[in-house]
Amino acid sequence: MNKTILNKKLLGGLLLALVLTACKSTPMANKPAGVEDKSPTSSATTGADANGADTSGVKEVTIDSNATGSGALNDPNNILSKRNVYFDYDSDAIKAEYRPLIEAHAKYLLSHDSAKMVLQGNTDERGTREYNLSLGQRRSVAVKQALNQLGVQDKQIETVSYGEEKATQSCADETCYQANRRVDIAYERE
Amino acid sequence: MMQIRLVLLLSLFLMPLLSRAELTIEISGGGAQQIPIAIVPFGQAAKPNQENLSNIINADLRRSGMFRVLETRGVANQPTDVSQIKFPEWTSLQAQAMAVGTVQPIAGNRLKVTFALVDVLKQNQLAGMEYNITPNQLRLTAHKIADVIYQKLTGESAIFASRIAYITKVNKRYALQVADVDGVNPQTVVSSNEPIISPAWSPDGTKLAYVSFEKKKPIVFVQSLTTGQRLTLANFKGNNSAPAWSPDGSKLAIVLTYGANSQIYTINSDGTGLKPVTKSSAIDTEPTWSHDGRWIYFSSDRGGKPQIYKVGASGGEAQRVTFDGAYNVSPRFSPDGKSLAMIRNDGGKFRVAMQDLASGQVQLLSDGSQDESPSFAPNGKMILYATRSGGRGALAAVSSDGRVKQRLSEAGGDIREPAWGPLLN
């Protein structure tokens, strides 16, 4: 899969999420930090095609979060467009070959105060989904700590994990598994 | 060895394409002593899209592995109530028990369902029920009748009048669905083009908590099944995942990360009152509550490889629970609280195992290589889990003694993350 396209999609999604958050939070500026609005999200439509009033009836909710976007960080000639850090099996150690990439992103964050990075950890499909979510998180934390060591503050970084959810399924060999064990670097805005 | 294949065809024209495809259920194995039973077709006007109740009851009993359901078509006597039974015909079929019943329309567009369970050898009635229902409660009523038969003849508690939740992935679209326990009547609770994982039933069966990646990160939602109303339960910096309801439904254990590793918290079911439970530098995840609500069991790699630990629901020192095997995760309590189901990595194969908490003894129950998400039936007699088959996700169930196995798969799709709900009233 073309990684640039993947990242653009990802960034677009983040942009959309940001716009939605902005729209939502404006009338509630006094909300304490970290407390989430409990109303259904604006990207959800509720119960559009709910059927009969069965006792076991279920209302259906549909969510669509498609969007696209792009930015200077996606210039293929710039090292900042490189967004993947790969790991060994059952490891969160960052390999030496990713130093230049991490240093370039640290430099970017240090020179762009308002830039916000999202580190998305991933694992291969082996193991349980929730446990893999935690393993993916450990990898995104490892990348964050490498950035911290270069002077980047936590407020510019969010570490999240997709666990095995974005993994290529039914891998037959190590090359395939390897591609799933990675952290993707994304920015909230560019 | 009994091998039966039931293909449950749904009335597809009633349902949107793809999201409500049929589930196929395949059963193998059986109890040591299967009870021979005859379920006589109910006295019921043949209507399109309305199955004869006897078919639904029949399939439920078969799936339990504890019954040998006899073919009744060759028998001349087709009673619909006890007075019409000609016992010699049924003793010659070698039925030990038989069920008869009717479905009749009554005033107010309602239905009256009658049912009797009879001991064929003693020629006495074991159970008799009458239900006054709306037409859309017909399948549920059939499951309730199957439960009455099952309870009377096996001594176990009810299982069939319950629902299962699971996630499907079809054409890159994810859907959290709820279906009757026989895989019929699947309904979409929420659908998204980003992953959905970890559905968890509220103890009263009216809500599902789940994790959705719709905002490009895991966030925990709680959704009412009847109104569709969605509450963002936890959307904190980092990951929000692994919801587990407390036994009284007032709280959930969840996993948050902020900028570090997964840790366990509790939160009220309305999203207030967040409290930390574990404080470690290791991974602590997959929480589940003990029946008295005092303990939270969870997976942690604090000792190196992942094992199951327990901690007081309001925090404190954690104690290790599993010592057998190098890798144990995904703890789930049996309804009687005496056993713990889990996923064990057994030489690279992830399988369902069950540990007796008193003796510490462990039994491997499943035979796949990527089995996960174990979930007990309301009576503890079956464990539903996710497996892989032909490169796709499928659901499977195994009896708690390992004897009876079932496999549920959806044509053309991937199905995973099952959760067996509580009994319906």
Image (spheres, coloured by chain):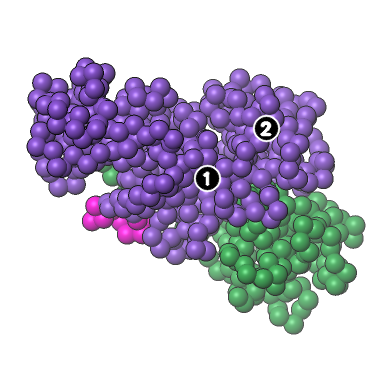
Highlighted magenta segment, given as a residue range: B11-21
> What residue do we see at 23% from left, 56% from top?
B13
* Residue corresponding to mark 1: B385
Q: Which chain is green?
A: A
Q: Which chain is purple?
A: B
Label placed on residue B361: 2
Left or right: residue A106 versus residue B404 is: right
Task: Indicate whether residue B14 is drawn in magenta.
Answer: yes
Q: Is disc 1 placed on a helix, strand or loop?
A: strand
Snapshot quadrant of residue B258: top right
> What residue do we see at 75% from left, 45% from top?
B326
A131 or B398: nearer the eye? B398
Task: Indicate whether residue B289 is drawn in magenta.
Answer: no
Does B235 sit above or below residue A157?
above
Residue B382 seen by the camera: yes
- Chain letter for mark 2: B
Snapshot quadrant of residue A95: bottom right
> Type of residue at label 2?
Gln
Would you call the spot at circle 2 few (<14 residues within 10 Å), some (14-19), or many (20 or more)?
few
> Type of residue at label 1?
Tyr
- Chain letter for mark 1: B
